[in-house]
Amino acid sequence: MNKENFTKRQTKQRLLSRYYPATAFLALIALWFVFFYTTNAISLIQIVLIAFFSLPLIGGSYLLFKQQQNLQKEITNHQVTHSELADQRHKISQAMEASKLALWEWDLETDSIYHSHFNDIFGYEEGEIPYFMGHLQPLVHPDDYPRLRQALIDSLKGRNTHFQCRFRIKHKSGEWRWLEDHGEVVERNRTTGNAKKMLGTRRDVTEEQEKDDYLQLAWKAFESSGEATYIVDPNSKIIFVNQAFVDITGYSRQDILDEDFWQTDCFATTRDFYKSISRNLKMEGRWEGELVQQRFNGESYPQWLRVTRVLNSYQQKPFTIAVFSDLTKSREVEARLNYLAEYDELTGLANRGQFYDRMHQRLAQARLYKEKLSLIVFDIDRFKAYNNSLGHHAGDKLLKLAAERIYNVLTSAVIISRTGGNEFAALILGDQEQAQLLSEELQEQMHLPFNVDRQELRLTLSIGISCYPDHAHELQVLLNQADQARLSCKSLGGNRVQVYNDTIRQSSLELLRLEQDLRKAIDNNEIQVHFQPKLDLNTGKITAAEALARWHHADEGFISPGIFIPLAERTGLIETLGSNVLEQSCRQAASWYHQGIQIQVAVNIAAQQLDSGSLVKQVDELLNKYELPAKMLELELTESTLMEDAEAAIVEMHSLRNRGVTLAIDDFGTGYSSLSYLQRFPLDILKIDRSFLMTDQGNRSQGTLTRAIIALGHGLNMRVVAEGVEDPQQLTELKQLGCDFAQGFVISRPVPAEEFTQLLDKQY
C-alpha cells in the first residue's frame, strides 16, 4: 500500500468511526420513542421490530470499533516500518558516503542529471555540467568515448538490461581519472518503449585501475621473461607456465596446465630430486641449485632452478613458484672461454699461457728425470708484407695453413704454440742435434707452396733454438735465448736456423747497452745529419743531396748506420729518430734556400713513420715552420716499406705529392719489384741499388740490368738515380746509359752541412 492510498483510507475510517456510532445511537433512541411513547401497550411485534432495527445498529457499531482497532494497529506497524526504512536509508547513505559511491539519475527527456558527490568525482560544481551527454562528452577520453556511448545505446535500446562501463574522464585538475558506471533504465514510454529515466552508480576506480595495470605489467613481465616460470597450487596442480617454459622445455601449455606435478612427464626424470626439494621447501621455504632436465624431444639440458614456497593471503595455503633458466648457452660460452684461455682461436694451437704452463711443468719433470729439452722459437719471414698485400683474410688463411703444416711436421713435440701474430714456439724432448734436424725439416716443408686465394706462396722461417740444460735451466732464460737466436736470424735476412751461443749472448748484451745509449743520444739530440751530394749527369752540377743519420758515440766513436738503424727499428725508436732527421734536414734545406742555394734534400722514411698516419701532417708543419718550398724536399721510401701496406701507402703518397713533395723509391730491385704496384705508386724518382752496379761492373758492353732499370724508370716518367757509384768508369757508363743522377763516394762521402756548402762553393 503506498503512502497516498494509506492516508485516504485512514481519513475515511476516521470519519466513519466518529459519525456512525452517534447516528446509530440517535436512530435507536428514535425507535424506542416511537414504539414506547406512541402507544399504550407494547406488542410482540413492536419488540421484534425494535430488536430487528436495533441489533444491526449495535452490530455495526461493534464492527466499526474493531475496524478502528485494526486501523490503529496498522498505523502503528506503518510507523515502525517507516522508522526502519529511514534507519536503513541513513545506513545506506553512510555506507555510500564511506565508499564514495555516487548515485546518478538521468532524465533523458530533459537530458538533466542528478548526481551525488559530483564535486568529489569531477572537481566541478553541478551547475557547471547541467546536461549529461552534451557537457560530459568533452571530458571523456577520446579513446574511451565510443565504448561508453555504445554501452549506453545498448542499455537504452534494451539490448542489455544492465549498463556497465569503465572509462577515463578529465578531472578539473587536469589529470585523467578512471570511473566505473553501473546503471539500468527504470522508466520507459509505454507507447514507444523509449527510455525516459535511468538510475545508476558511479565510483572513482583510478587507484584500482593503476593496481590492475601494475598487475598486468607484472603478468606480462612473467610471460615475456627469458626465464621459465611455473606455479603449482596446494593440490600439486600446475596452474601457470609462461612462454619461456614452453620454449625451453618444448612442452605446450596443454601438456602441462591442470596436470598433477608428480605425474607430469616434464618432471619425470628428476622426480626423486624434486621430492628432496619439496622437503627442503617445507623446512626453509626456498631452494636454489642446478639440475639436469629433459626437453620434450628427449634432449638433456642443464638448468638453474629457484623454487619458493608462498602462502596465499586468504586461506594461508602453500603455493610453489619455480623459476629456472636454461644453462645450455652459458655452458657453451663457458666452454668456449675455457678453450680460448688455453688455445689460439685461429690456428687451434696452444696459446702463450698454456705453453708457458706446460713448459714449466716439463722443465720440472726434466730436472727430476735428467732429461734434455729443446725450445724452438720461430716466425714467418716478411709475413706483414703478405698480410698487407693479400689482405687480412688471406693472411689469416695463410696462418691456419701454416699452423697445420707445422703441427704435421712437429708431431713429436711436447707442445706447439702460437705465441704471437706470426710467431710460434715448440718444446721437444731431445737435444740440440734433434732440434736442428726438426727445424731444417720444418724449413723444407714450409717452402712447399701454399695456395691462398688462387695464389701460390712459399714461406721461409727464422728459427732460434735454446736447449736445457746446455744453455739454461730456467724457463724465462730459455725463452729469451731462443728469441735472441731467432732475432739473429732476422738480422741476417731470415730463412735460417740459429742455435743460441756465446756470440749471440755477447751480441745481445752489447745491443742492450747500445740501445740504452741510442735512447739517450736521441733524447739529447746527439744524432747528426750528414749530406751526400747527388750529381746531375746532364749538367755535371750538384743539385740535390741525401740526408743520412750519423751517430758519434762518446766511447765507441762513429757507430755504423747499419748497426743503429736496424736497432732503432727493432726497439721502436725508428719513428722518433726518423722525425728528428726529417726536421734537421728541412731546417738545413731551408737555410740553403734562403741563402739562394737551391738544393733538394732527400730524406729516408721508415715504414713506422708511414704507418703512423701523421707523416703528412708533420711534413706540412715543417714546411710551414721553416718556410721551405715543397719542391725542395724529397722523401725516399724502400720497396719493402711501400709493400707492407700498399693501399695505405698510395693514399699517403698522393697527399704528399699533391703538396709538391718529390717521392722516390729507394733500393729498387732488392725487394718485391712489383711492376703492377710500381705503376700505381705516385713516384718521381727511381733509385738503382748499388748491387746492380757492382754486378754490371766489368761487363761494359752490356750493362743489361742497369740499362733495363733506367729504361723502365724513363718509361714510367721517372728520373733515375744510381747510388753507390765508386769509380769514374761507372760514372761514365751511367751517363752513356742515360741515367739522370749519380750518388756515391766517387763524388763525395756524406759530409756535414758546412762541408757540403764548401763543395757547392767549389763547383761555382
Image (cartoon, rainbow, N blue to C red):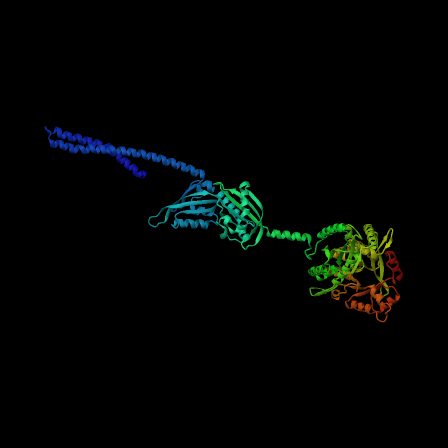
Counting the numbered discs, the total is: 0
Q: How far from the left and from the top, in percent, is residue 378?
A: 76, 57
Hey, which residue is sitting farthest right in the picture? 762
Q: How far from the left and from the top, in percent, is residue 637?
A: 78, 60
Hey, which residue is sitting farthest front in the picture? 369
Q: How far from the left and from the top, in percent, is residue 700?
A: 86, 70
Hey, which residue is sitting farthest bottom in the picture? 701
| Residue 610, quarter of picture | bottom right
Res 431 seen here: yes
Q: Quadrant of the C terminus?
A: bottom right
Res 626 seen here: no
User: 419 or 639: which is nearer to us?
Assistant: 419
Q: Quadrant of the N terminus?
A: top left
Q: How far from the left and from the top, in percent, is residue 681?
A: 75, 63
483 left or right, relative to 60: right
| Residue 80, quarter of picture | top left
User: 630 or 358: which is nearer to us?
Assistant: 358
User: 608 or 601: which is nearer to us?
Assistant: 608
